[in-house]
Image (cartoon, grey):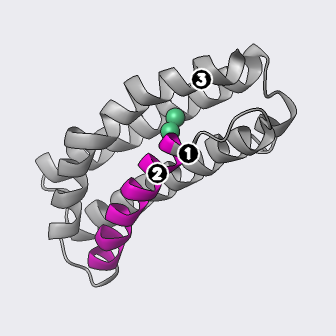
Amino acid sequence: MLYESVFHHLRGTKAGEILDRQHLQIKRKHQDVRTAILEGGGMERIIACSKDLIAATRAHFQSEERAMDANTLRNFTAHREMHDDIIESLQDISNDLEQRRISGAMELMKLFESRILYHLDIEDAALERELKS
Ligand SMILES: [Fe+2]
Ligand SMILES: [Fe+2]
C-alpha cells in the first residue's frame, strides 16, 4: 500500500517522492471536479468526484502526519494545525455533500483555490525539506 511505505522511508527521498505523487493525484482529482462542474456533469458525478477528492486529501494529510510522528526530533505543531483547520472546513463540505447539496462542491473548489493548493505547493514543500533535514 502506497501510504504505508511512507513510514519506512522517512528521511530518504522515497517519502518525498510518495508525498509528491499524492500531490499530483490530488491535483488530478481537483481538475476532475472542476471539469464535472464546467461540463455540467450532473449532480451524481460532481458529488462523487468531490467525495473522491476529499478522501484523497484526508489520506494524504494522514501520510504526512505519520511521517511527522516518526520524526521524534520535532513536533511540527504549526503544520499539524494547518491540517486541522483544513480538515475542519472539509468536514463541513462533506456534510453538505452527504445531504446532496451541490453548493458543497462549489465550496470545495473555493477552498482548494484559496487554501489547499497553496498548502500543497508551498507549505508542504517546506515540511518535506524539514523532514529530510
Ligand atoms: Fe502534502
Ligand atoms: Fe501538509
Q: Give the CA separation, mark 2 to mark 1.
A: 6 Å
Q: Give the CA separation, mark 3 to mark 2.
A: 16 Å
Query: How dense is the environment of label 3, judged by Cα within 10 Å: few (below 14), some, or many (20 and up)?
Result: many
Query: How dense is the environment of label 1, judged by Cα within 10 Å: few (below 14), some, or many (20 and up)?
Result: few
In depth, the one of 76 and 12 nearer the eye is 76
Q: Which residue is mark 1?
A: 77
Q: Are marks 3 and 1 in contact (CB under 8 Å)?
A: no
Query: How dense is the environment of label 2, judged by Cα within 10 Å: few (below 14), some, or many (20 and up)?
Result: few
Q: Residue furthest bottom?
A: 99
- Specify the label residue 128 is tagged with: 3
In depth, the one of 65 and 5 nearer the eye is 65
Q: Residue at x 42, y 47 (%)?
A: 82
The answer to whether the beta carbon of the residue marked 3 is less than 8 Å from any atom of ligand 1 is yes
Q: Which three-letter amino acid code belongs to the residue tagged 2? A: Glu
Q: Which three-letter amino acid code belongs to the residue tagged 3? A: Glu
- Region rendered in magenta: 78-97
* Element assignment for label 2: helix
Residue 112 appears left or right of 126: left
Residue 10 appears left or right of 64: right
Q: Residue at x 61, y 30 (%)?
A: 19
In depth, the one of 74 and 12 nearer the eye is 74
Q: Residue at x 81, y 37 (%)?
A: 5
Please name which of the two marks, 3 or 1, marks the residue nearer to the observer: 1
* Element assignment for label 3: helix
Please name which of the two marks, 3 or 2, marks the residue nearer to the observer: 2
The stretch drawn in magenta includes residue 93: yes
Q: Residue at x 59, y 17 (%)?
A: 129
Location of residue 63 by image quarter? top right
Q: Give the CA separation, mark 3 to mark 1.
A: 15 Å
Q: Are marks 2 and 1 in contact (CB under 8 Å)?
A: yes
